[in-house]
Image (cartoon, rainbow, N blue to C red):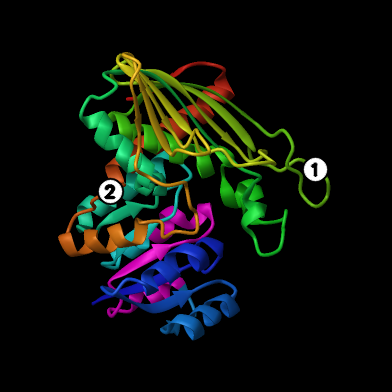
Amino acid sequence: MIHIGILGCGNIARSRHIPEYASNSECILTGYYNPTAAKAEEMADRYGGRVYASAEALLADPGIDAVSVCTSNDAHAALSIAAMKAGKHVLCEKPMACTPEDAEERVRVSEETGCLLMIGHNQRFLPAHREAKEYLDKGVIGKVLSFRSVFGHGGPEMFMPVKDMSSWFFRKEKAAMGAMADLGVHKIDLIHYLLGEHTVKVSARLSTLDKRSDNGELISVDDNAVCLMETESGAVGTVNASWTYYGRPDNSTVLYGSRGIMRIYDDPEHSLIINLADGSVITGRSGPMDFRAPSGVIDCWIESIKAGKVLQSDARSSLDAMKAVFAAIRSCKTGTCIEID
C-alpha cells in the first residue's frame, strides 16, 4: 500500500487529487497540510489520515511514501525539491516551476535522489487525445504540417466555491504567470505528446484584457495568450490560452497533415473526426469530454510508483513544455522570436 501526503487542500486537491486517491485501492491517504488548517481537517475527517502542523512535519514522516503538491504556483518548486530530498515521490500540479532555473533544479534533484517527479498534465489522459495519438502513430493523416490548439474558459473563479478575485491565481507574487501557465502549458504539452517532439521556436503575445481584482484594477498576470510555435520537424501552429471565454469553454485541437485533417474536441457531437484527403471520414470511438470523470492522472501516478518510473508527464517532458512557456513570456517582453535549446 502506498501512503500519500497532500500539500495544499485547495480546489484542485479537493476536486481531483484527494477523491481520486480515495478511489484507488493501491494507496491510502495518510496526511494533509494546508496553511488554513480547517481545510486540511475537513479532508482528514472525510477521507481519513491526520493533519500536520507544517509541510516540514509531513515530509519528515517516514510513513509517507509520496506527496501531491497542490499549492499556489510560487511554492511548487521549493516543496517538490524538499519532498524529494526527504525521499518522497512527487506529483505536482502545473506549472512545474515559476523560473527556468527552478524547473531545471527540480529535474536535477529528481535524477539525483532517484525520487519520481510527475507533473499533472491531464490533457494527455483525455480519451480522444489518447485515441488521436494511436491514429497519429499509425500515420493515418501523414506528416503533421500545422496545428492549432485552444484552451479557454471563463477563468479560475468559475471553479471556486465562492467567486474570489483576490485569489492567488490573479496575483503575480503567488502565481507568477496567468493563463499561459495555467492553460497554455497544457496544450503545449499535448502537442508534444501527440507529435512526439518538442517546440524549438516561439513567438507570443501575452495580455491582460479583462480580468479585474475586487478594487477594479486589472489583475497582475495575463488572462490571454497567443503563441506561434514551431516543432522539431518544422510543423508550425498556434496555441491560444484564455480566461475570458465567457460562454462555452473551448478545449479543441486541429492537426493538419499531409494526408488529412484531425479534429479533436472540435465538434459538439464527435470528440474525434478525421477527414482524409481521399474524401473518407473516420469517426472516433471516444465520447464527449466529461470533466466530471476521473482525470486518469492519479491512477497513472500510482502505477508509476509501482513501476519505479513515470509513465506519463515525467520531469524531462514537463521541462520541455515549460521551456516553451518561458520562451513565450520572453518573446512577449522582447518582441522577438525565441529559439529553444
Q: Which mark is residue 312?
A: 2
Residue 285 shown in magenta:
no
Q: In the rendered structure, which amino acid carries the disc numbered 1?
A: Glu
- Of the pair 204 and 176, the residue shown nearer to us: 204
Question: Which residue is pictured at 53% across the width and 44% down the height?
Answer: 182
Q: Position of residue 7 (x, y in %)?
A: 45, 68
Above or below, 122 relative to 66: above
Note whether residue 84 is visible. no
Question: Which residue is pictured at 27% across the width and 18% down the height?
Answer: 143
Start-end of magenta stretch: 55-80
Residue 67 shown in magenta:
yes
Q: Position of residue 61 (x, y in %)?
A: 33, 79
Earlier-in-chain disc, 2 versus 1: 1
Q: Rounded to the nearest whole Å, what is the CA distance between mark 2 and mark 1?
A: 40 Å
Question: Which residue is pictured at 43% across the width and 39% down the height?
Answer: 271
Q: Quadrant of the C terminus?
A: top left
Q: Quadrant of the N terminus?
A: bottom left
Q: In this figure, which residue is indicated by the disc labeled 1?
A: 217
Q: Is residue 319 left or right of residue 38?
A: left
Q: Is residue 160 left or right of residue 83?
A: right
Above or below, 29 relative to 248: below
Q: Position of residue 84 (x, y in %)?
A: 30, 61
Question: Which residue is pictured at 76% across the width and 44% down the height?
Answer: 212
Q: Position of residue 225 (x, y in %)?
A: 58, 31
Q: In the rendered structure, which amino acid carries the disc numbered 2?
A: Gln
Q: Residues within 10 Å of mark 2 (few under 14, many from 20)?
A: many
Residue found at the very far right of the displayed protein:
216
